[in-house]
Image: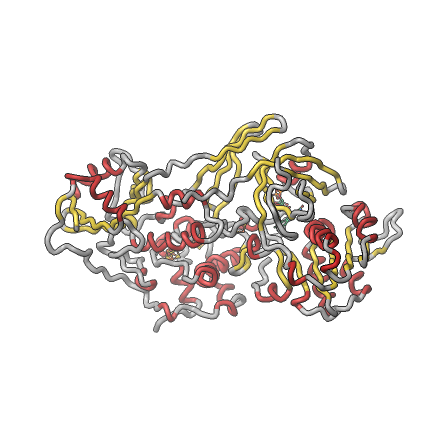
Amino acid sequence: MTAVNPLLPQKVTLQEIVAETPEIKTLRLASEKGIPFDFIPGQCAMISLPPVGEALFSITSSPGCREYLEFSIKKVGAVTRALHELEPGQQLGLRGPYGNGFPLEALRGKDLLFIGGGIGLAPLRSLINYCLERRGDFGGIDILYGARTPEDLIRREEIMERWPAAPDTRVYLTVDAPYPGWEGHVAFVPAYLSELAFSPENRIAITCGPPAMIKFVLKALEELNFAPEQVITTLEMRMKCGVGKCGRCNIGSLYVCRDGPVFTLAQLRQLPPEY
Amino acid sequence: MIRYIQESRLEELFRILSRRGPLYLPLAEGPSLSFRPWSEGAPVDLKTVNSTVSAKEIFLPREEAYFCYRRAGRELALEPLEQEAANAVAFGLRACDLRGLEMLDRVFKDQDPPDGLYLRRREQTAIVALACAEPAPYCFCSLFGIDPARAGGADLQAWWHGEGLCLKALTAAGEELLSSAGELLHEGPAGAEEPPRVETGNFGLKLEGLPAGLRERFDDPVWEELYRSCLGCGACTYICPTCYCFDLEDFGHQEKGERYRCWDSCMFREFTLMAGGHNPRPTRKERVRNRFLHKLQYYPERYGEIACTGCGRCLRSCPVDLNIVQVIRALGGESR
Ligand SMILES: Cc1cc2nc3c(=O)[nH]c(=O)nc-3n(C[C@H](O)[C@H](O)[C@H](O)COP(=O)(O)OP(=O)(O)OC[C@H]3O[C@@H](n4cnc5c(N)ncnc54)[C@H](O)[C@@H]3O)c2cc1C
Ligand code: SF4
Ligand code: SF4
Ligand code: FES
C-alpha cells in the first residue's frame, strides 16, 4: 500500500481577486477541472503560497458552484498579506477539504437564524447560498450581519440585493457606530439580536464572528430561550496539518480541524474552556 | 530456530544489513544516544538503556522536506520529494520503543487519512528489537504491561547471551534478515531459546490506581502548583516516544525552495498563538496541563490507551523533574 501524502497541496489558479473592504479580499480559485474537490458548507481548505507558507480558510462559495472555490481573506499576517498582493493567473497550492462542516441534516425543515460579524460571514455565506439553492428544504431564513463600519461589510451585492429578494428571507444589517451616509441600524450585533427577539421555536441559530461577539451572541440567545442544541457556532484555533495529527488545534480530546470547526453550544459545554 | 553472533563480529553484520538500505542503530553523539543511520566505524551502543531520544525519529524524523517548489512569474511547480526509506533496518529498539510506535501508528497509520511519509518508512523498515538485560533506574514499563524481553511488533527479537547476541525471527522479514547474514551467524547456544526474564520497577504505581475522572479535574488546584517549575524548554516533548506534534514550514526564496515538516512542541507559547495575538494556551500552566492530559486523558479517550510507555526518559531528562510519575502522584495516582 502506498498512501499519498495528505500534506501535499494540489495546484490551483487564482481566477479573480476582489477587494471587499480595505482589509478583506475575496479570491476565486480553480483547478483545471473546476472545483478541485467536493465539500460541504462550513468546511475549510489550506491555501499555500511558498515561500510564505500556508493558512486555513473557510470555503465561502456554495457547493452548488462547480467552477471555482471562493475564499474571503482578511489581512492579518504573513500569508494573508502575500495573498492580498496576488494578481489573477497566479498559481497556488491548495489542500482540503477539512473539518466537519455544518450539520445539514439537522437543519432541514427548520427556520434558520444566521448571525455574523465581520469576516465571520465567510463560512455562513456558503451555507446561506446552499439553503437558498434548495429553498424548499428549509423554513424561514433570517440573516443578521454586522461590522464595525459600512465599509467593513462584505459581499454587498448579496447582503443588500440578492438575499433580501430571496423568498421568505430577511436581512438585518448593523454597524457599530454612526457613520456618514449610513442610514441603517446602529448597534453591536448582540444588542440588535436581543432587540429583534427571535423566537426559538423550530429555529436553529448559526453564528460566526470575532470571539467577543460570539460570547455575547451566545448570551443573548440564551436569554431568548434558545436551547444549547439549537445554537451552532464555529471555533478557530491555530492550525498546521488540518488532519488531526500535528497536535496544534486540540481542545480536550477533540481536534478542531477534523471534529470541528462547527460545534453546537451543547457540544462546546462538554469541552474544557481552552479556545 | 535461534541464531547467534559474537559481539566482536557485529560490525560485519551491520555491514551486510546496511547494504539493503539505511541501518538505524543507537549511535553515541557525545553524551547523547540516538538512532542514526550507521556507517563504517560509527560508535554503536547496544548496551545503554535507553537511547536519549526515542526511536520515533526513525519514522517521524526531526525534519524532512516533502516537496520542492519553483516559482516563475505566476507559475508554481510543486514536486513531491522522494524519501530514502527503502529497505531500512531499525536495530536495537527496546520493547518500550515498540510500544511507542503502536501509539504513533494509531495517529499516523490507522487514523484516516494515513500519513504517507510515516507509512512509507514504517512499511519499508524491518525492526530488530533488543531485550533489555538490565533495566535503568528510571524504567517503569511494567506499569503498562510491557515485557522488556519481548517486544510486540518486531521482525526479529535479539538478546544478549554470553559474549554475543541471540537472534530469533518473528516474521518472514525477520527470517530474511537472518538468511542475508548467512555464514556470519551460528546456531544458538543450548538453553538459550528465549530471552531471560527481566523485572522492571513501577515506582509503586498501579494501572488501576492511575488517576481517573480527569475530565472533571481540569480546574483542579493541582495544576496551579505543578507547572510552576517548568522552564518551557520542550525537552520532554522531543525525547518522549509518544509526543508527535509537528510544524510545517517553507525554506527557500521566491523562486525555489522546499516545504518541510519538523518536530514542534506544545510546551512553546508560539505553538497555539493565533493571528491577532489570542492564545488559547497562554501560560505554562495551560501548556503543562495540556501535555500531561494528552498522555493521561485525551489520547486514551481518542485511541483507547494511556500515551506513556514507562520509558523513563522524562524522569532522566527534565531539568526540574516535572515528569509523568510526579504528575501521576500529584493527581493522587498512588497504589499505596
Ligand atoms: C477553521 C478556520 C477557518 C478560518 N476561516 C478564515 C476565513 O474564512 N477568512 C480569514 O480571513 N481567516 C480565516 N481563518 C483565520 C486564518 O487562518 C488566519 O487569519 C491565518 O492563518 C493568518 O495567517 P497569516 O500567515 O497571515 O498570519 P501569521 O503571520 O501567521 O500570524 C500573524 C499573527 O501571528 C503572530 N505573530 C507572527 N509573527 C510574530 C512575531 N514576529 N512577533 C509576534 N507575534 C507574531 C501575531 O499574533 C500576529 O498577529 C480561519 C481559521 C480557522 C482555524
Ligand atoms: S516539563 Fe521539564 S522538560 Fe518539559 S518543558 Fe518543562 S522543564 Fe522542560
Ligand atoms: S511520558 Fe515520560 S516515561 Fe512516559 S513515554 Fe513519555 S518520556 Fe517515556
Ligand atoms: S491542525 Fe494539526 S491537529 Fe488540527
In the image shown, does B34 or B59 lie closer to the viewer?
B59
In the image shown, does B131 or B119 lie closer to the viewer?
B119
Percent x, y of residue A211: 67, 56
Percent x, y of residue A240: 54, 46
Percent x, y of residue A31: 62, 37
In the image shown, does B51 or B158 lie closer to the viewer?
B158
Tell me, yes or no, if residue B7 can be seen here: yes
Picture quarter containing residue A34?
top right
Residue for point 78% across, 50% down: A148
Q: Which residue occupies the extreme left position in the image? A: B190
In the image shown, does A34 or B159 lie closer to the viewer?
A34
Q: Which residue occupies the extreme bottom position in the image? A: B336
Number of disc labels: 0
**Quadrant containing the C terminus of chain A in the rendered view:** bottom right
With respect to residue A90, does B126 lie above or below?
Answer: below
Percent x, y of residue B184: 16, 39
Q: Tell me if A155 is positioned left or right of A7 in this view.
A: right
Tell me, yes or no, if residue A174 can be seen here: no
- What colour scheme was applied to this rendering of the protein? secondary structure
Q: Which residue occupies the extreme front position in the image? A: A136
Q: Tell me if A251 is positioned left or right of B4 in this view.
A: right
